[in-house]
Image: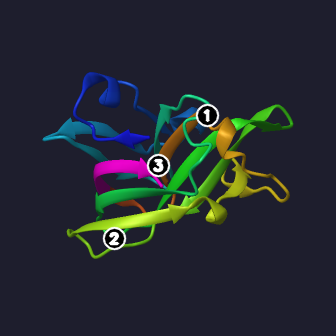
Amino acid sequence: MYVKFETAQETGQWRAVNDGVMGGKSSGGPRFENGNMIFEGVINTNGGGFSSLRSPVDKGDLKDASAMTLRVKSDGRAYKLTFRTDMTYRGRLISFQAPIPQTPKGEWAEISVPFSDLSGSIFGRSLQGAKFDRAQVQEMGIILADDQDGPFQLEVDWMRDC
């Protein structure tokens, strides 16, 4: 899987999910410029505190992968890469998350997120014992939920499995 954000197919499937689904006041979403995805908005921790992007993945696309590599330009905040499979807990889909390694603010960097670093959670709360099955991934995304108010921006040039 290789996403370059250059075609309508690569950009049109990304959608924002912010804390407004829980009564929060954060805003955020993607925009696409010069072949890059720019995830930007404002986090408001009063009643919420997260903004995320999600895109569907065809089941089986990541079955042979062990990590996801990204080329990013960050604002220095603590973003996470997220994946969802068909695994549920109490009727809710489990989100598997791992930190995106922090990079120098405003500089392009190539980073890798090993699937072995993923851990399960529901509504931001850790879920013990959930097993990530890369062959069953049906959605991937990026989330910011770092308990800090204020604007954010993460620019992504490309994403690929490895």
Q: Is mark 1 on a helix, strand or loop?
A: loop
- Tag shown at residue 108: none
- Tag shown at residue 60: 1
In the picture, measured across the screen, residue 75 lies left or right of residue 141, that is: left
- Asked whether residue 146 appears in the rendered view, the answer is no
Vertical relation: 43 (above or below) 7: below
Front in this rendered view, residue 108 or 41: 108
Residue 161 % position (x, y): 47, 50
Q: Is mark 3 on a helix, strand or loop?
A: strand
Label 1: how many Cα within 10 Å (few below 14, some 14–19, many 20+): some
State the quadrant of the N terminus: top left
Distance in Å between CA atoms under marks 3 and 1: 20 Å
Label 3: how many Cα within 10 Å (few below 14, some 14–19, many 20+): many
Earlier in the chain: of badge 3 and badge 1, it is: 1
Residue highlighted by disc 3 = 142
Label 2: how many Cα within 10 Å (few below 14, some 14–19, many 20+): some
Residue 161 located within the stretch drawn in magenta = yes
Front in this rendered view, residue 71 or 15: 71
In the picture, measured across the screen, residue 30 lies left or right of residue 137, that is: left
Residue 94 lies in quadrant:
top right
* Region rendered in magenta: 152-162
Residue 49 located within the stretch drawn in magenta = no
Amino acid type, residue under disc 3 in the picture: Ile
Earlier in the chain: of badge 2 and badge 1, it is: 1
Residue highlighted by disc 2 = 76
